[in-house]
Image (spheres, rainbow, N blue to C red):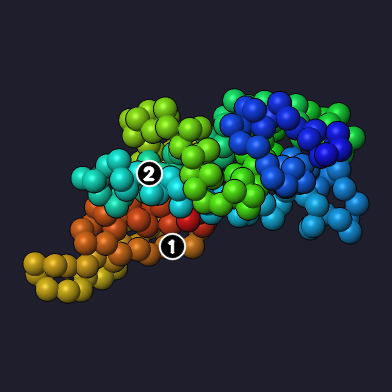
Amino acid sequence: MSAKGRRHQKLEARLGYRFADPDLLDRALTHSSALSPASRTERSYQRLEFLGDRVLGLVVADMLYRLFPKASEGELNRTLVTLVRGESCAAIARQLDLSEELHLGDSERRIGSAENDSILADAAEAVIGAIYCDGGLGRAYEFIERMLGDNIGHAVALRPDAKTTLQEWAQGQGLEPPTYTVAGKTGPQHEPEFTIEVNLKGHEPLRASGSSKKLAEHKAAEGFLIRERVWKETL
């Protein structure tokens, strides 16, 4: 195999995974700025990052489902958001020293993009996508579990509350706190379904439903945060 074919041997050791197709790992570490416009779709990490993001969400959801059999949907989702958000993925990238392996264009390298949280997070997800493509879901699961296993308990303690996050974000935008109103109620008395509308000045309202007012409010806040790109879509 050529030197280029195994150019990331030390990284493979840190990953705990040796690629059958080393080109996949090379692609996972290639930023679009390092390529000509015609090659970016095929050769940059963008498509692998898209895939790895979904694999990460699925694996973490499965891990939480198995580890916390008494946790509610809302509790599971808030913990998942903590574990798969950009900051967590960037931390994984730093743990693996991905910044030293990234292929960047000259201008991006000069401005320090190798340490940019967003780029590092994307690269970490692209590496997950590459492992999934090369070795299947089982190997990707093993890698994610190894990288995140020690952080799950911490994430449970620190998982963000959607309503609190939305209120803090609104304050950061110089806005009054969001308001929550009951937009509807359906179902029998013993099994009601509430629809809650969250309103924030300058933004379109958003509605969500749940089996209690509290759950519906949290779902509405989560949906609002995702729509406004404060939080990332998890699955």
SS for callout 2:
helix
User: Residue at image x 52%, y 51%?
Assistant: 137
In the rendered image, the vertical position of residue 146 relative to residue 174, given as above or below: above
Residue 213 visible somewhere in the drawing: yes
In this picture, residue 208 sits left or right of residue 37: left
Q: Which residue is mark 2?
A: 63
User: Residue at image x 42%, y 32%?
Assistant: 149
Residue 170 visible somewhere in the drawing: no
Q: Which residue is mark 1?
A: 205
What x and y, as percent, mark residue 43?
80, 52
What x and y, as percent, mark residue 204?
49, 62
In the rendered image, the vertical position of residue 163 relative to residue 39, given as above or below: above
In this picture, residue 217 sits left or right of residue 190: right
User: Residue at image x 32%, y 48%?
Assistant: 65
Which residue is at the far left?
190
What x and y, as percent, mark residue 2?
86, 38
The residue type indicated by label 2 comes to Met
Marks 2 and 1: which is nearer the front?
A: 2
The residue type indicated by label 1 comes to Pro
Q: Are marks 2 and 1 in contact (CB under 8 Å)?
A: no
In the rendered image, the vertical position of residue 191 relative to residue 172, given as above or below: below
In this picture, residue 6 sits left or right of residue 165: right
Tell me where residue 82 sits by quadrant. Answer: top left
Count neighbours of disc 2 (C-alpha within 10 A) and say few if under 14, some if 14 to 19, many if 20 or more.
some
